[in-house]
Image (tube, grey):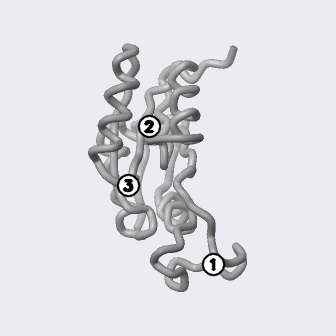
Amino acid sequence: MPSLKDKIALVTGSTSGIGKGIASHFLSLGASVVVHGPDLASAESTAKSMRSAGRDVDAVAGDLREVDASRQVMRDVIARHGGIDILVNNAATVARCSLEDATTRSRPRESTSMIPAASAASSVTLYPTSRSSTSMTS
């Protein structure tokens, strides 16, 4: 079985459903997992239940519909863990337009897509082989 020992995995939208399953699977492979949720209470609750199995789990929160909040989630994880080796961009609901037409400014507030989190991730330079050299751009 493959090993994710010494890897840091951020799984957005991991307080329930598929995201929680992905986070649990990464834990079973040896990764340190950062659980993300829209609010800190749900993220902490999920992280606490995963920690009870003796796993290395952290929690962060933020509304990924907002670019600044997405960037802050990334900054928080990098500050706490020295970098991110694996990013699973799972937080989303159904987008109300085609991907080609989606922008971070044109979406209705109630329509969440993965565009802001992807934009935030692309604004952060990650070096998966050496977390000590991870840098951030804005």
Circle nearer the viewer, 2 or 3: 3
Q: Which quadrant of the figure has residue 83?
A: top left
Circle nearer the viewer, 2 or 1: 1
Query: Please, which residue is most extreme toward the left here?
Result: 41
Image quarter of the C terminus: bottom left
Q: Mark 1 highlights which residue? A: 102
Rendered position, 38 above or below 112: above
Q: Residue at x 37, y 14 (%)?
A: 54
Q: Mark 2 highlights which residue? A: 131
Q: Which quadrant of the figure has residue 73?
A: bottom left
Q: Are marks 2 and 3 in contact (CB under 8 Å)?
A: no
* Crowd band around label 2 with a 10 angstrom C-alpha radius: few (<14), some (14–19), many (20+): some
Residue nearer the viewer, 104 or 135 = 104
Q: Mark 3 highlights which residue? A: 38
Q: Earlier in the sequence, mark 2 or mark 3?
A: 3
* Crowd band around label 1 with a 10 angstrom C-alpha radius: few (<14), some (14–19), many (20+): some
Dot 1: what SS? loop
Q: Residue at x 63, y 78 (%)?
A: 102
Q: Are marks 2 and 1 in contact (CB under 8 Å)?
A: no
> Which amino acid, by three-letter code, is at mark 2?
Arg
Q: Residue at x 44, y 32 (%)?
A: 33
